[in-house]
Image: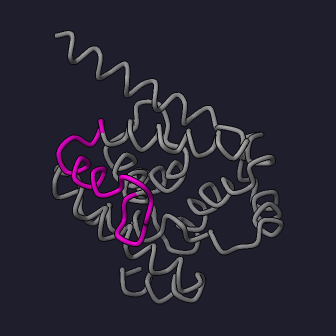
């Protein structure tokens, strides 16, 4: 499927706001891929498709996951907003024809991150937070940092996400904590050399 065909299909699946967000993530992912030497085409596809399941009602999303035997972590049943990432990777593969494991993994982990993330996953996680349509405190500083030091930008982004989740009284996904701890430890080890 060409990117144009993906866009046409995606536009039918998402509301206008989510579609515009997806385009912003695609463009931000492309920019970061160019900064860090990642495959630009993979970044564009993962970026534009990352939220392909976002507008599916939660009950329907869980029913599809059950029917298609898509494994979900227990936290998804409490924090139901996480399900779209796991279902999104499945939809990207089966409805958009994405076969590349790096792209599917980046979509799968774009809301939580995970320990020792590959570059493409880092790019999609961060692009989702800093794309031009987002408006959160200190975002411009984070956007600039993302182009200079992706790992430091990720640490700050994950810290912000964790603070936001805690402020709502919600439950953290362990993968997010593991992603942060891995990045912080890696940074400490590099600075000790």
Q: Nearer the viewer, residue 37 or 149?
A: 149
Quarter of the image where the N terminus is located: bottom left
Above or below, 186 against 192 in this view is below
Q: Residue at x 52, y 87 (%)?
A: 11
Tell me where residue 9 appears, x and y as whole percent.
52, 86
70 relative position to 190: left or right: right
Q: Nearer the viewer, residue 8 or 51?
A: 51
145 relative position to 123: left or right: left
Quarter holding residue 182: top left
Above or below, 63 against 146 in this view is below
Quarter holding residue 46: bottom left
Q: Residue at x 76, y 72 (%)?
A: 57
Tell me where residue 146 appears, x and y as whole percent.
26, 49
Q: Residue at x 49, y 36 (%)?
A: 114
Residue extent of the magenta highlight: 130-152
Q: Residue furthest top?
A: 192
Q: Residue furthest front?
A: 137
Tell me where residue 91 appears, x and y as whole percent.
60, 68
Quarter of the image where the C terminus is located: top left
191 relative position to 175: left or right: left
Quarter holding residue 174: top right
Tell me where residue 80 appears, x and y as whole percent.
75, 54
């Amino acid at each position: 499927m060409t990117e144009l065909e993906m866009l046409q299909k995606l536009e039918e699946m998402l509301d206008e706001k989510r579609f515009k967000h997806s385009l912003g993530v695609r463009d931000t992912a492309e920019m970061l891929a160019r900064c860090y030497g990642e495959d630009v085409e993979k970044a564009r596809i993962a970026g534009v498709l990352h939220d392909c399941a976002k507008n599916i009602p939660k009950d329907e999303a869980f029913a599809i996951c059950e029917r298609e035997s898509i494994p979900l972590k227990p936290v998804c049943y409490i924090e139901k907003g996480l399900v779209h990432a796991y279902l999104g990777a499945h939809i990207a593969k089966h409805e958009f024809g994405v076969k590349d494991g790096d792209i599917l993994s980046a979509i799968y982990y774009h809301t939580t991150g995970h320990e020792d993330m590959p570059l493409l996953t880092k790019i999609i996680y961060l692009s989702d937070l800093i794309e031009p349509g987002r408006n959160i405190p200190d975002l411009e500083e984070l956007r600039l940092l993302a182009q200079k030091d992706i790992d430091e930008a990720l640490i700050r982004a994950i810290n912000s996400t964790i603070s936001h989740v805690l402020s709502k009284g919600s439950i953290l996904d362990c993968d997010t904590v593991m992603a942060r701890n891995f990045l912080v430890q890696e940074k400490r080890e590099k600075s000790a050399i």
